[in-house]
Image: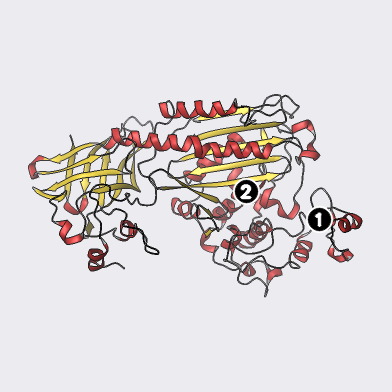
């Protein structure tokens, strides 16, 4: 806990000018953009993206790969942008569109974890796997369900899948310098396309022969079999298999008609070269199905992405916990969630935007789902090529376009909307009180508090008495707290956010030290000073049905200021 005395000592630099960078709070700099569609920023981003498609050096329109992409915002009902490419070869459908079906590989893991959250909830995440899977008793008591969901269990990647001993002869193995194995060391099941599927008993037989990769919770290590074990635990807890839960609680609930857990669709499938077995269209993963077996379409994946961001199937609180890092990789810009591959993208003002992604690969199919909760924005990429195609590279380039092109456009649009919706003077002439709010065009983050006067006394500004008392008060920045009131439009056409909460920070980045957080006070100083159970950093805007601020409530000062 930080006392007032500590705040006084630690607040060495106030927000006067730009000697150091603004210290932003985690989360969006401005409210999410509401009107990306039709905006000049989105139009420019689309034009830039489509220029990439015609750049022959990038080869995004190859002769052997089909693909589709879609950009969506939960703030708008219509898809913001979509594009589909059908190569000149036979791909099983006449023309690729939003309902064409691809395999999504490890993006399936998102649905497996989501189903667990729907059916059981993350309250089980700290339970050991041994509580629900008796085959692991006395061996894996340190491994929790949450660690299985977030690649933090330290266990083997697969039980048998990819085991070369089942795919090559002894003669070939010796040619590679490998020793000759005893017959009992060669798996007789669970190598897709080579052997039959394993039973549950056989899966444990081969899995328990392997050494752990790490101690649990030490470092992320990618594992497919982890999601098989999580599925076993879910069935023990709820009585429902992963297949049943994903199908009924997600696919059926969201009307994802072109999605299936592992059943091969009878029509609408993208099968490059029209050779199902060669590209992995009909590959059956058996016990490891929860890790990568699913089929889906671009339109269905958009439905799923919207539902995740809008907390359609789980509570907003559980969604916020789900969309958080659970373990750090060895690279500062990348973390892992359950099962998210989280990329921290740094903008020019040093602010970090966390993108929650999941990529998947199965056979010649390559998929990606990207979510930016801070912008209520998502991006879907599905691709499939022939066996010797470069479909994986195509997916990667399309995947990266979100961060390179569309995310900056959304950030810019949020900035421009904030200028229109919040800039201005808010005042109550009867009490001689006012506040001036300025959002800079492509400048500093958040809403700038240029001045705040309460009953004729300057609270924020160069003459503020709080500068001497609290080391802050000369200027400040407001950031969305994500606390809001939702009301219905008077014409009954839907809802809008009628009250938006913001938190203010009055501290800039201090000179970086070897250890101390240069922005420590931005978040450690929240909630102070306190006056009558309300703090100076607690601000609420009342919003009209046109999404523009009409009134400002500075709660500590009990001020209601009308926008002029």
Crowd class of label 1 (few under 14; some 14 to 19; many from 20; radius 10 Å): few
The spot of residue 133 in percent (x, y) is 67, 66
**196, 314: nearer the viewer:** 196
Is residue 267 found left or right of 325 in the rendered image? Answer: right
Q: Who's the residue at 12% across and 51% down the image?
A: 463
Residue at the extreme bottom = 138
> How many circles with numbers are drawn on the protein?
2
Crowd class of label 2 (few under 14; some 14 to 19; many from 20; radius 10 Å): many
Image quadrant occupied by the N terminus: bottom left
**244, 485: nearer the viewer:** 485
**291, 330: nearer the viewer:** 330
Is 127 located above or below residue 43 in the figure? below
Is residue 172 found left or right of 118 in the rendered image? Answer: right
Question: How has the structure been colored for display?
Answer: secondary structure
Q: Who's the residue at 28% across and 43% down the image?
A: 447
The spot of residue 317 in percent (x, y) is 44, 54
Contact (Cβ within 8 Å) of mark 2 with mark 1 = no
Of the residues under marks 2 and 1, which one precedes in the sequence?
A: 1
Q: Which mark is residue 246?
A: 2
Circle 2 sits in a helix, a strand or a loop, which is it? helix
**Residue 466 visible from this viewpoint:** yes
The spot of residue 5 in percent (x, y) is 22, 68
Is residue 546 found left or right of 71 in the rendered image? Answer: left
Image quadrant occupied by the C terminus: top left
**Residue 73 visible from this viewpoint:** no
Q: Who's the residue at 44% across and 50% down the image?
A: 316
The spot of residue 197 in percent (x, y) is 80, 54
Q: Which mark is residue 164?
A: 1
């Amino acid at each position: 806990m930080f006392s007032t005395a500590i705040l006084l000592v630690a607040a060495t630099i106030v927000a006067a000018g730009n000697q150091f960078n603004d210290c932003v709070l985690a989360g969006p700099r401005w409210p999410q953009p509401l009107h990306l569609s039709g905006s000049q920023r989105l139009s420019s981003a689309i034009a830039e993206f489509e220029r990439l498609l015609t750049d022959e050096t990038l080869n995004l329109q190859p002769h052997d790969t089909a693909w589709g992409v879609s950009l969506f915002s939960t703030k708008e009902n219509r898809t913001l942008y979509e594009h589909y490419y059908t190569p000149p070869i036979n791909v099983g459908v006449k023309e690729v569109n939003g309902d064409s079906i691809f395999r999504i590989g490890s993006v399936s893991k998102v649905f497996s974890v989501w189903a667990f959250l729907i059916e059981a909830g993350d309250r089980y995440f700290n339970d050991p796997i041994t509580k629900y899977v008796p085959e692991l008793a006395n061996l894996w008591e340190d491994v929790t369900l949450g660690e299985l969901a977030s690649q933090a269990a330290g266990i083997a990647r697969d039980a048998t899948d990819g085991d070369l001993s089942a795919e090559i002869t002894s003669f070939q193995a010796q040619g590679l310098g490998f020793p000759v194995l005893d017959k009992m060391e060669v798996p007789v099941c669970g190598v897709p396309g080579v052997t039959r599927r394993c039973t549950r008993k056989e899966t444990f037989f081969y899995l328990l022969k392997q050494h752990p990769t790490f101690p649990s919770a030490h470092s992320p290590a990618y594992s497919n079999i982890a999601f098989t074990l999580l599925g076993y635990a879910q069935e023990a807890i709820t009585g429902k298999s992963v297949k049943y839960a994903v199908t009924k609680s997600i696919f059926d609930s969201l009307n994802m008609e072109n999605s299936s857990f592992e059943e091969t669709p009878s029509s609408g499938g993208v099968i490059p070269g029209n050779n199902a077995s060669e590209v992995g269209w009909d590959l059956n993963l058996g016990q490891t199905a929860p890790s990568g077996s699913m089929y889906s379409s671009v339109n269905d994946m958009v439905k799923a992405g919207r539902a995740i961001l809008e907390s359609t199937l789980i509570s907003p609180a559980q969604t916020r916990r789900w969309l958080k890092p659970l373990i750090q990789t060895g690279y500062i810009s990348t973390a892992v969630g359950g099962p998210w591959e989280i990329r921290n993208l740094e903008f020019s003002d040093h602010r970090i935007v966390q993108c929650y992604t999941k990529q998947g690969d199965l056979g010649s199919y390559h998929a990606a789902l990207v979510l930016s909760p801070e912008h209520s924005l998502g991006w879907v990429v599905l691709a499939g090529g022939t066996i010797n195609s470069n479909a994986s590279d195509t997916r990667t380039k399309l995947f990266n376009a979100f961060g390179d092109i569309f995310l900056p456009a959304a950030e810019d649009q949020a900035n421009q909307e904030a200028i229109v919706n919040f800039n201005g003077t808010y005042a109550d002439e009867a009490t001689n009180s006012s506040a001036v709010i300025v959002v800079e065009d492509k400048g500093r983050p958040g809403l700038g508090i240029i001045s705040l006067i309460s009953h004729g006394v300057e609270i924020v500004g160069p003459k503020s008495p709080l500068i001497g008392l609290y080391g802050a008060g000369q200027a400040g920045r407001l950031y969305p707290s994500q606390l809001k009131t939702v009301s219905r439009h008077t014409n009954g056409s839907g809802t809008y956010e009628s009250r938006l909460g913001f938190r203010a920070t009055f501290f800039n980045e201090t000179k970086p030290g070897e250890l101390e957080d240069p922005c420590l006070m931005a978040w450690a100083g929240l909630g102070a000073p306190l006056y009558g159970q309300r703090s100076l950093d607690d601000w609420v805007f009342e919003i009209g049905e046109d999404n523009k601020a009409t009134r400002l409530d500075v709660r500590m000062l009990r001020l209601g200021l009308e926008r002029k």
